[in-house]
Image: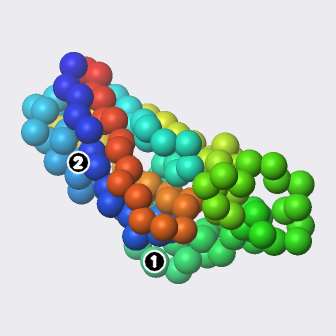
């Protein structure tokens, strides 16, 4: 079964599309039909399948999650105990718990069978840049 490690460098919080990299892995594998499993190896980011046509979708998702889970320094977040890695760390763990750390995408015709406007995204929940690793595994 083909497997690889996709590495993404983030610039801070936000959504980072990696659809092309995943599709290239599937093409290079030669597998025509199967299941692409994606797993992010971190606890403060997550994976999403989301619209990739209108950048306003990404901006609105960022704004929603910032309102849903503000930084630890926000007055409403005084209950947070874990603060060792900065005010964005525990909120990042909460956001990752609310979203997915793995995705399954069917493969057909040698490509991921995403919808017309769907893309694969790493959702970075930390404020500073990080190097993130996504395991891509293809089962035929």
Q: Is mark 2 on a helix, strand or loop?
A: helix
Visible residue check, residue 105? no
**Pick the front one: 75 or 58:** 75
Q: Residue at x 45, y 77 (%)?
A: 54
* Relative side of 130 to 99, left or right: left
Q: Position of residue 135 (x, y in %)?
A: 33, 35
* Position of residue 122 in the picture relative to residue 68 (left or right): left
* Residue lying at 38% horizontally and 50% vertically, measured from the top left: 132
Q: Is residue 127 above or below residue 82?
A: below
Q: How far apart are marks 1 and 2 (CA)?
A: 20 Å
Point out the residue furthest to the bottom here: 56
**Residue 23 numbered tag:** 2
Q: In this view, does 89 lie above or below 37?
A: below
State the residue lying farthest toward the front.
84
Q: Nearer the viewer, residue 19 or 73?
A: 73
Classify the position of the N terminus by image quarter. top left
Residue under label 1, please give it: 54
Q: Write the residue at 29% across / 22% down.
A: 139
């Amino acid at each position: 079964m083909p497997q690889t490690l996709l590495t993404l460098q983030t610039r801070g919080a936000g959504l980072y599309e990696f659809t092309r990299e995943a599709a290239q892995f599937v093409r290079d594998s030669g597998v025509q039909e199967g299941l692409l499993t994606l797993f992010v190896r971190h606890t403060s980011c997550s994976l999403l399948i989301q619209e990739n046509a209108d950048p306003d979708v990404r901006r609105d998702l960022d704004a929603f999650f910032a309102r849903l889970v503000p930084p630890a320094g926000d007055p409403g977040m005084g209950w947070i105990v874990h603060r060792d890695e900065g005010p964005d760390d525990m909120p990042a763990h909460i956001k990752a718990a609310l979203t997915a750390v793995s995705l399954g995408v069917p493969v057909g015709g040698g490509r991921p069978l995403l919808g017309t406007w769907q893309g694969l995204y790493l959702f970075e929940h930390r404020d500073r840049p990080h190097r993130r690793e996504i395991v891509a595994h293809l089962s035929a």
